[in-house]
Amino acid sequence: MIYLVFGVVWILYSDRFLETIVDDVQTLTQLQTYKGWSYVAITAVLLYVLLYHGLQKERTLSSRDELTQLLNQHMFRRELASELAFASENQQKVALITFNIDDFRRINHVCSHAVGDQLLTDFANLMHDFFAEQPNLIARIGADEFAVALLNVKNTENAVLLVRELQEDFKKLKVEGYQSELMIGAGLAMFPSDADNLKDLLACANLAQEEAKNLGPGQLRLYDHFFGESIHSRLQLTADLRHAIENKGLTVAYQPMFATHSMQLTGVEALLRWNHPHLGPIRPDTFIALAEQQGLISRITDYVFEHAIAELTASDLLGTQVPQLSINVSAIDFAEANSVERFYQRLAHLNDWSLLTLELTETAVINNFEETLRALSALRQAKIHLSIDDFGTGYSSLNILRRLPIHEVKIDRSFIRDIEHDDDDRTIVRTILAMAHSLDLKVVGEGVENTEQLKFLLKHGCHEVQGFLMAKPMNVSELSAFVSNLPAATDTLKQFVRSQSQTGLAREL
């Protein structure tokens, strides 16, 4: 555009200008020649400036992250490869650290994408200032992932100290609308001790970061060669899990739930179990997390629905002696575009959908709130009961809770476990009960293992309880026998509840 404007002005006005200042034809002809050469020279300079500016801009765009102005992943790998070659020739050490902002997805969702972008920019500025004293490579390599290569670092300990300092400084950043503490996880790998080339060094740092993420928020892990073996083990376990799903190698156990004030059976929760042929029983939190990471969770949900409904229906328990069936579902089950339709398909063989309760975690709801809200509303209209499991471990406010079309909340067992002697846990449980009562929601206490816990929940208005004190998880044949002998099985607890009621410790529900 600049060149076009210059050309038009030159053509329209340059001749007129010369004619106004020169009358002699010969002189005018000579000046026209000079004018032509001047035009060529000026054009050349102008084109050079414009092209140089354009190339510089293109180079910046191709090498820098647009939001943070840090190196992008491509340029970071290119520069790091060059630095590793130099370090190898000069026998220097390089520390590669990858960072991941914990809970960034929820910050984006709850506080808005603009706030999330500002946090990314603030962290980029923090890293730039933090590592400004010595030459280092700093990059944004993913949505909320960053990397820094510490060049010519003395030893691993120095690198660890710097990471710890940065993690502490990151906690001081402020995010509008986010009340929890900000944290970043980090994985660290050393060149050349952990890896002697670019590809392996990046893989080592990423593995260390993955292990840090598995430990929880704000963790730092140094690469260990065991991580590679651990990855292989996870791949083998994934293959075994896929085989177990396809060949019905998983089983379902059922844990009864009871009305607190009467000890009457109110329903059962279906719990998935996997007895590995070589490794023995695998913890549910292990293989469920693995299924979510490997894209198998929807197939597992299908399995539980089909298996539990078929077993309880064939045993003539569901809807008769067992009033309600609760099934845990993953947040990923609500992430699919056809999630509601898939739930309908899972319930095709169940005549009365009101016999079913879907349990999903509080954190799962928050991480994908609007999409999950729409799905839950559709499922509630279909008369399916909805429950928030592990309540109290996430970040739900009363405002969020009242928007959810749910019927009940389940207090996480971690708050019940030490309720007899932990003031904080007692306060949390009372607060949850007060919130639920204000919204007319049913409350279920999980993990009740002794009469002191039952007594506290009874006193403060918890509607239902579940735990080893009443009944452990059992297979369908054991459940049939249990419900047949239910009066005898719960007689002692009924007497306990009546004694508490008579002493005025229990409230009417």
Image (cartoon, rainbow, N blue to C red):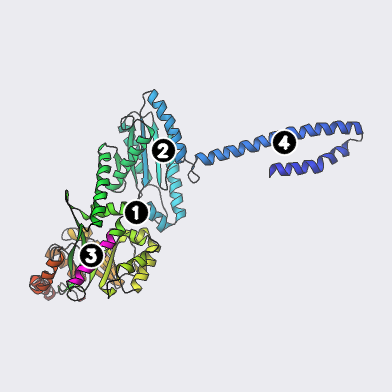
In contact (CB < 8 Å): disc 3 and disc 2 = no
Does any portion of residue 133 appear in the rendered image? no
Percent position (x, y) of residue 217?
Answer: 31, 48
- The label nearer to you, 3 versus 2, is 3
Mark 3 closeness class: few <14, some 14–19, many ≥20 residues within 10 Å: some
Q: Is mark 2 on a helix, strand or loop?
A: helix
Kindly report the distance in space between the C-alpha atoms of the residues bearing marks 2 and 4.
45 Å
Which residue occupies 25% across, 57% down?
246
CA distance for labels 4 and 3: 79 Å
Q: In this view, does 287 lie to the left or right of 26?
A: left
Amino acid under disc 3: His
Residue behind mark 2: 130
For label 4, the SS is helix
Say whether marks 4 and 1 touch (CB < 8 Å). Answer: no
Which secondary structure is most common in the magenta stretch?
helix
Query: Of callouts 2 and 1, which one flags the residue occurring earlier in the amino acid sequence?
Result: 2
Q: Mark 4 points at which residue?
A: 43
Tell me the number on the disc at residue 496: none
